[in-house]
Amino acid sequence: MTETKTIPIFPLDLVLFPRQELPLRIFEPRYKQLVDDCMLGDGQFGVCLIDEGNSVNGWNSPQMIGTIAKITKCEDVEMDGLQLHIETLGRNSFKIKKIIPPSIPQPENYDPLSVEGHQQISEMHEKIGTEEKMYIRAEVEMIPEIDESISLEQWEKLVDLWKKKIIQQALPQVVEPHSLDHVLEQYYLTTDTPTIDYIYSLSALGAKDPHELQPILEATTMDELIQKVEELLTIK
């Protein structure tokens, strides 16, 4: 039996891979509550790409596969009212088994960036009781890490595909291959001993849109992962 647990969920317009760093600025009341709850608990929440085809109580719905984010640093930032700045690190990926909707629906014409929007949410929250959760939670089960290794030959093939894609996308401008080597150095992707993290980072460099990265996060074997990355980096 796979163990399930209930965690807070933060739908975002991005894909977080295991062991990647993700800094976030938190200004919405519901996500401040999420961070407060995490800081009192184990400091972990789930990051999922937004599922644009669905909503939960009017709010953005998450994709069913996401990654645990562990808060490594949290500080207050004063800017037009209080914001939180957190730094997080990706852990395991997980699969959502059941979504637990937030206690308040999204108000009509809600503006997450406005003071009025924040006041509106806070007032609704006080009415129903401040112990109620304003954010989405979910029962999730952890997905085991891919523990197979990638060969140098496989890695070099992926790098080659990435270079071809970037050169093609830049046309009519000319991109010299050696300048792409410099990019790989900047991102610490020059290696003779590639790991799965290198594949994730190269994918992120090769994607125009976070939705292109979701299938890569969802891959469960090295063969499937390499196939998905090849699809991403192959010029259509």
Image (cartoon, grey):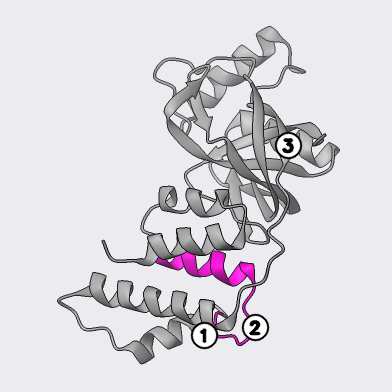
Which x, y percent locates residue 111? 43, 27
Q: Which residue ends up furthest to the bottom in the rendered image? A: 178
Q: Residues within 10 Å of mark 1 (few under 14, many from 20)?
A: few
Residue 83 in view, yes or no? no
Q: Nearer the viewer, residue 191 or 36?
A: 191
Q: Mark 1 belongs to which amino acid?
A: Glu
Please name which of the two marks, 1 or 2, marks the residue nearer to the observer: 2
Which x, y percent locates residue 25? 58, 48
Q: CA distance from mark 1 to mark 2?
A: 14 Å
Mark 2 = which residue?
193
Residue 175 is one of the magenta-drawn residues: no
Left or right of residue 3, residue 67 in this image = left
Q: CA distance from mark 2 to mark 3?
A: 31 Å
Predominant secondary structure, magenta span: helix
Q: Mark 3 belongs to which amino acid?
A: Glu
Which x, y percent locates residue 69? 69, 49
Q: Earlier in the sequence, mark 3 or mark 1?
A: 3
Mark 3 = which residue?
141
Mark 1 = which residue?
185
Q: Which residue ends up furthest to the top in the rendered image? A: 127
Left or right of residue 120, residue 9 in this image = right
Magenta stretch in the rendered image: 189-206
